[in-house]
Amino acid sequence: MSAAISICNVTKRYKKLQALAGVSLEIEQGEFFGLLGPNGAGKTTLISIIAGLTRADSGSVDVLGHDVITDFRASRRALGIVPQELVFDPFFTVRETLRIQSGYFGLTNNDAWIDEVMANLDLTNKADTNMRALSGGMKRRVLVAQALVHKPPVIVLDEPTAGVDVELRQTLWKFISRLNREGHTIVLTTHYLEEAESLCKRVAMLKQGQIVALEATADLIKRFSATQLVLSFSSGRLPENLRAMAIDPEAATTSSRVALRLSGHTELEAILAQCRNAGAIVDQVQLQEADLEDVFIQIMQGASPTMAEVTA
């Protein structure tokens, strides 16, 4: 069985910027997969190459076994993309927009599925509303509906909940999770790492155009499962000799709330004593386990295992 998406040694350069530097990755059919990284890591470039909007300088990408360049019709038919940008035609209603999108894929008499998609995204009462009259959140719902209108087996969501309300997030994830249970492959990029942690069974992290982590989400978190100590200061800051333990070194010097990485609970009293001796007043102490956001920060700051260790 072909992988849902197969990426082999893909590179892309924009003048002096190396956007992608030899990315290789396979996403299996039926996965809920997270593609994570800071702004500028290369996520959107990679998605643009998968979608056929941008050509890689080298390497290859297949969608369900169809090369995105030489077999582009089949690869694009298998793919639904929800872009970051709000792109819409202001001259059509919501229903007309979805019918036109259906026509791009040669689908006629698709109204039953269009109605189901609109119902699941709470767009039914906006079906006859002109696109330019919709709020930003409603326009984003239509973008999701457009990506799903041809029932693609592979769905790529590029920051789908950026700047939207809680209601849309809940509605969207309920519908997308249902599609995933029915066998659709979902690829998600998001800066809301709690979403990725709860939804994605496996994640890849990109940094400066390279994959720096690729693993099952739960296994990746276990690699960074050391206990964390969160200190809130009402006066003073974390003593300088403790700043090497901080998960976010910048916060250690500028913030009144700092998270430290502990090797064991026995370190707690010594750390509090050093804070007192430095004249810092701690008004709140919290012990907690690592989550995906903590892992992300550590990896992006370079405190990550090598790729050989990650993929072992």
Image (cartoon, rainbow, N blue to C red):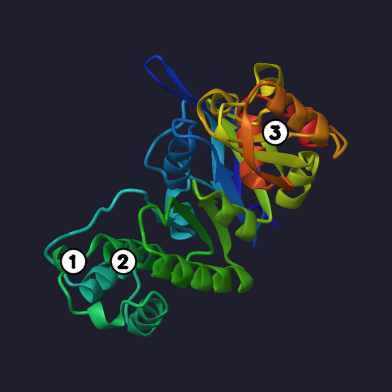
Extreme-left residue of the structure:
91
- The residue labelled by disc 1 is 131
Dot 1 falls on a residue whose secondary structure is: helix
The image position of residue 312, as x and y in percent, is 83, 36
**Secondary structure type for disc 2:** helix
User: Horizontal and vertical percent for residue 34?
Assistant: 59, 49
How packed mark 2 is, by other alpha carbons closer than 10 Å (few <14, some 14-19, many 20 or more), is: many
The kind of secondary structure element at disc 3 is strand
- Indicate the amino acid at tag 2: Val
Q: Residue 81's image quarter? A: bottom left
- N-terminal-most mark, 3 or 2: 2
Are discs 3 and 1 less than 8 Å apart at CB? no
Cα separation, mark 3 vs mark 1, equals: 48 Å
Distance, label 1 to label 2, CA atoms, is 9 Å
Name which residue lies at 48% across and 33% down: 42
Q: Tell me which amino acid carries mark 1.
A: Met
Checking the image for residue 260, the label placed there is 3
The percent position of residue 255, horizontal first and vertical second, equals 52, 31
Who comes first in sequence, dot 1 or dot 2? 1
Q: CA distance from mark 3 to mark 2?
A: 43 Å
- Front-most of 78 and 97? 97
Task: Give the residue displayed 18% in from the left and 59% down from the top.
Answer: 89
The residue under the point 74% across, 47% down is: 289
| Residue contact between numbered discs 3 and 2, judged by CB atoms under 8 Å | no
* Mark linked to residue 142: 2
Q: Amino acid at mark 3?
A: Leu
Q: Position of residue 252 (x, y in %)?
A: 59, 26
